[in-house]
Image (tube, grey):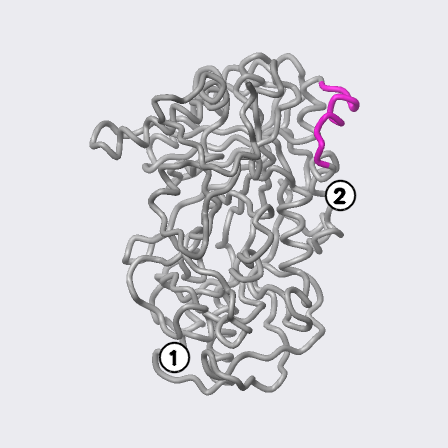
Amino acid sequence: MPVDLNNELPLAWDSATLDADTKGMLDNLQPNILRAHVREHLSVLFVRFNDVAEGRRFLRWVATTKMKSARKHLQEVRDFAAGRRRGTPYVGIGISKAGYRDLGHSVEDVRKFADPVFRDGMKRRVAQVNDPAVEEWERVYQREIHAVILIGDAEAEPVESLREEIVGELPQSARLLGEERGQGMRNPAGDGIEHFGYVDGRSQPLFLKDEVDREPRKLWDPAFPLGNVLVPDPFAPNPVRHHGSYLVFRKLEQNVRAFKEIERDLADSLGLSGVDRERAGAMLVGRFKDGTPLTLKPKAGGGPVANDFTFDGDDGSKCPFSGHVRKTNPRSFGRNVLMARRGQTYGERADQPWDDSPPENRPSGEVGLLFMAFNGSLLDQFEFTQQSWANNADFEVEATGHDPVIGQGERDLKVTFPKAWGKPGKSDPQAQVAQTVTMKGGEYFFAPSLAYLRNL
């Protein structure tokens, strides 16, 4: 029988009783969807095809010679954890609506994709999520991108070698439109962070039993059904047994200097001093720099990054309703909205993101996040999150403001912040913080099954 994508139980992929249908699904699924693949070093290639036969031949070659399956990736992770050999690099492929057309699929064929957002493409969805006008995007994203090729590994050399081999195999009729390079950043504790200096990527939906079993689950259950990220691949040999996922890619530039100025000014306006000044930034993000949830503690510290919590009982006097992690994962509802985020930071900087340097020593541009996330529905997950939560000044309580990190749109109302953690009393109404994250361009892709790619 086909795999039940709505099964609430996490997938025990390495069970001795794993059925043949589930094995077949994992053998034909790309890695990095159900479980994040190591991508400390990442190359993101944007390609345009201009010849059906040559484009198909190239993707078939990549899929058959350079790509591993999700099950192979999971086996490599298990072997590495057991002290055996390290895994092989990750290669992933996403195809845009225009890419499918250029590979010979008709307009009617593309309508087999149920998601209207994918069928539109990102350029036609600017108004829905308050993105900048397409004319303001970086040049590569203004062009018609047919495919994205992701190459990632723990070390730089395998990525570079594989990149050169793949680029060298591009047919003459194709064009490499552009490339992004990502590189992971970690704080002294070894946790992955983003350019504002905060631990990132902690509140992820988990789909595999071995990952779920390692998580505390008293208050928050991180286990999600496969349907949050997987959908039938309409062009695969057997669509109900071969699966893919909708992939959103967005280049988000971060003005670190401006964000640090906002943190400083907010701390000043609330009269915070000493280590308590760190609470200003935590009110914007919803976590302290080390990942400590603001709804749990008034100060950072206390061991591993907590993820077993909800906002139940927090009326906004601990973590404001506008806090980024509260806006994008309210936890008490909206579980079906959560995406599998697989982004990576980009850009070089001279300072250390976690140090106490003044704002003027921070970068004001050229650094940020290559945001990537897998969805079962771009409409009901990514775009809903951006439009109805992050950009909505009245979510979850009226007049709480935009998401201070990724919110987009006019900030024309005044907001307040709690003066003391967990106690009554708010600041005077003040203007919302300025937008410090700028979307520079992107595209919607579908990450097809290996069965499709290998049969092109």
- Dot 1, crowdedness within 10 Å: few (<14), some or many (≥20)? some
Instruction: List x then y, in percent, for residue 88.
Output: 34, 27
Query: Does the magenta run of residues contain 324?
Result: no
Nearest the camera: 107 or 25? 25
Instruction: List x then y, in percent, for residue 409.
Output: 69, 62
**Spatial distance from mark 2 to mark 1, Cα to Cα?**
44 Å
- Dot 2, crowdedness within 10 Å: few (<14), some or many (≥20)? few
Q: Of helix, strand and loop, which one carries label 2? A: helix
Tell which circle, 2 or 1, labels the residue nearer the N-terminal end.
Answer: 2
Residue at position x 41%, y 22% in the image:
18
- Using the image, determine if residue 257 lies above or below residue 102: below
Instruction: List x then y, in percent, for residue 201.
Output: 44, 51
Residue at position x 57%, y 13% in the image:
57
Residue found farthest to the left: 83
Nearest the camera: 236 or 357? 236
- Using the image, determine if residue 219 lies above or below residue 230: below
- Which label was assigned to residue 276? 1
Instruction: List x then y, in percent, for residue 452.
Output: 58, 18
Nearest the camera: 176 or 406? 406
Q: Of helix, strand and loop, which one carries label 1? A: helix
- Which label was assigned to residue 124? 2
Magenta residues span: 105-115
- Which label was assigned to residue 284? none
- Using the image, determine if residue 419 lies above or below residue 142: below
Q: Can residue 24 be seen in this snapshot?
A: yes
The quadrant of the rendering that contains the N terminus is top right
- Residue type at tag 2: Arg
Residue at position x 62%, y 59% in the image:
390
Prevailing secondary structure class for the magenta stretch in the rendered image: loop
Residue found farthest to the right: 108
- Residue type at tag 1: Asp
The quadrant of the rendering that contains the C terminus is top right
